[in-house]
């Protein structure tokens, strides 16, 4: 492989890994860079200057993902949404292609370690910047336009805590790869700082769930077989301590119970009374109505918002998705779209059998599956690219010597 092409592909991967939690502009730039590297590699393979990567050697999860993407794009045929909404949905679903493109470039450039280190650098910058903001320091590169006491640097109160939890998991699994051997103690300090940031500094309830899951997975993996039961008790203890000691956690969890109770007790709520959880319940109820009315094919590409309002949704400025990954696919893609999504997630679990970092891959998958119950992690910019890039990284075949 020409050295310039190797460097070009590696820069795209490392750049995307650094920028996945730093805002849409940088992410878009390095996705374009990575796509150009992908097509250059394809061209060199077509010309016979690189060995061909046989399709049968591709992970089954990549093939399932291709089928899922094609189905959702094909659903534009029967979608009643206007062209602008369809185009936006096309762009968001096409985010899924980060996985096959990144995996392909990683396999051919053997840049897994460099990409992992780029991911680590980006997350450490966000982590330290978050603590600097919480201490009242001015952070000129923060672009989130939120109050400094939230500690959110580039993204949102929903995404950053989940990303911090993923950072802790990646350092737990790959700290020996990312850090020099003499700095291995730093791994545990960064894990502790990331989890503390989620539990005691952030307001993102999705992050609490992701962090509890990370604590569970770490203990389950490290505990002797006879003490595996502690993997359930310790996260529960951590969450109890966070609820007791952190006013922010206490407030956010209490609001959930209040808003859910308020929604369930009355069918006459106004838009102003919904609250965060009430809006989710309203989104989900209308999504189930869509599935009932269009069970097999769904309402089509980008048509969720239009049908939400048509079915009596209470929020006039509702987003483009129901904040639930499975209901989004079931409503826009029907049972076929949902089946393809579940098939893809199952295929990732199975593909872990033959990869280097099997535990890391399955941990990221479990976090994505759980977060998908009350968000659309693969649909939004930032978190979606992070998850898909981590999948690509950890799908490295065990037979590879890279």
Image: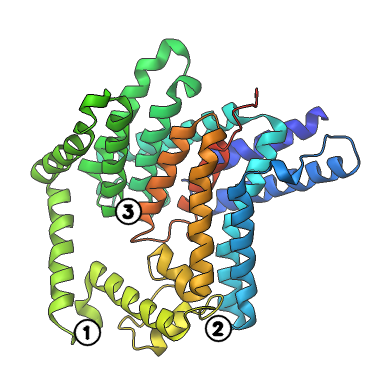
Point out the residue furthest to the right here: 47
| Residue 29 appears in the figure | no
Query: Residue 94's spot in the image, x, y percent?
Result: 61, 61
Mark 2 = which residue? 81
User: Residue 40, percent across and down?
Assistant: 80, 44
The disc placed on residue 157 is 3
User: Horizontally, is 19 left or right of 103 in the view?
Assistant: left
What residue is pinned by disc 1? 270
Which residue appears at 58% of the width and 82% of the height?
79
Disc 1 to disc 3, C-alpha distance: 25 Å
Q: Is residue 266 left or right of residue 326?
A: left
Mark before the other along the chain sequence, 3 or 2 = 2
Task: Give me the residue at 38% from left, 47% from top.
Answer: 367
Q: Earlier in the sequence, mark 1 or mark 3?
A: 3
* Residue 113 figure quarter: top right
Q: Nearer the viewer, residue 318 or 148?
A: 318
Query: Is 177 in front, or is 230?
Result: 230
Nearer to us in this view, 285 or 229 = 229
Within 10 Å of disc 2 (Cα), the crowding (few <14, some 14-19, many 20+) is some
Q: CA distance from mark 3 to mark 2?
A: 30 Å
| 37 on left or right of 352 | right
Is residue 21 visible in the rendered image? The answer is yes
Q: Is residue 7 above or below residue 351?
A: above
Tell me what residue is drawn at x 35 percent, y 16 percent: 185
């Amino acid at each position: 492989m020409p050295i310039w092409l190797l460097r070009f592909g590696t820069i795209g991967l490392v750049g995307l890994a650094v920028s996945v939690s730093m805002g849409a502009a940088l992410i878009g730039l390095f996705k374009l860079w990575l796509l150009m590297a992908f097509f250059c590699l394809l061209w060199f393979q077509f010309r016979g200057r690189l060995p061909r990567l046989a399709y049968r050697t591709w992970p089954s999860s990549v093939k399932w993902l291709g089928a899922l993407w094609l189905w959702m794009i094909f659903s534009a045929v029967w979608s009643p949404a206007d062209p602008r909404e369809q185009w936006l949905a096309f762009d968001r679903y096409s985010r899924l292609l980060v996985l096959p493109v990144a995996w392909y470039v990683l396999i051919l450039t053997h840049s897994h370690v460099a990409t992992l280190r780029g991911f680590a650098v980006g997350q450490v910058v966000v982590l330290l910047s978050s603590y600097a903001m919480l201490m009242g320091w001015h952070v000129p590169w923060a672009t989130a336009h939120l109050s400094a006491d939230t500690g959110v640097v580039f993204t949102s109160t929903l995404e950053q805590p989940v990303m911090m939890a993923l950072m802790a998991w990646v350092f737990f699994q790959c700290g020996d790869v990312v850090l020099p051997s003499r700095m291995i103690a730093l791994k545990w300090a960064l894990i502790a700082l990331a989890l503390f940031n989620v539990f005691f500094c952030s307001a993102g309830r999705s992050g609490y769930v992701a962090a509890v899951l990370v604590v569970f997975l770490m203990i389950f993996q490290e505990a002797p077989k006879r003490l595996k039961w502690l993997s359930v008790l310790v996260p529960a203890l951590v969450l109890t301590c966070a609820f007791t000691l952190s006013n922010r956690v206490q407030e956010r969890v209490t609001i959930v119970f209040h808003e859910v109770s308020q929604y369930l007790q009355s069918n006459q709520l106004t838009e102003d009374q919904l609250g965060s959880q009430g809006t989710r319940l309203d989104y989900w109820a209308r999504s189930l109505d869509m599935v009932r009315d269009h069970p097999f094919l769904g309402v089509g590409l980008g048509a969720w918002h239009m049908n939400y309002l048509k079915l009596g949704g209470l929020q006039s400025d509702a987003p483009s998705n129901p904040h639930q990954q499975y209901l989004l696919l079931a409503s826009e893609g029907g049972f076929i779209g949902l089946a393809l999504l579940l098939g893809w997630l199952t295929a990732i679990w199975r593909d872990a059998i033959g990869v280097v970092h099997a535990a890391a891959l399955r941990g990221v998958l479990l976090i994505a599956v759980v977060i998908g119950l009350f968000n659309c992690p693969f649909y939004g910019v930032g978190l979606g690219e992070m998850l898909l890039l981590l999948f690509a990284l950890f799908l490295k075949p065990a037979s590879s010597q890279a």
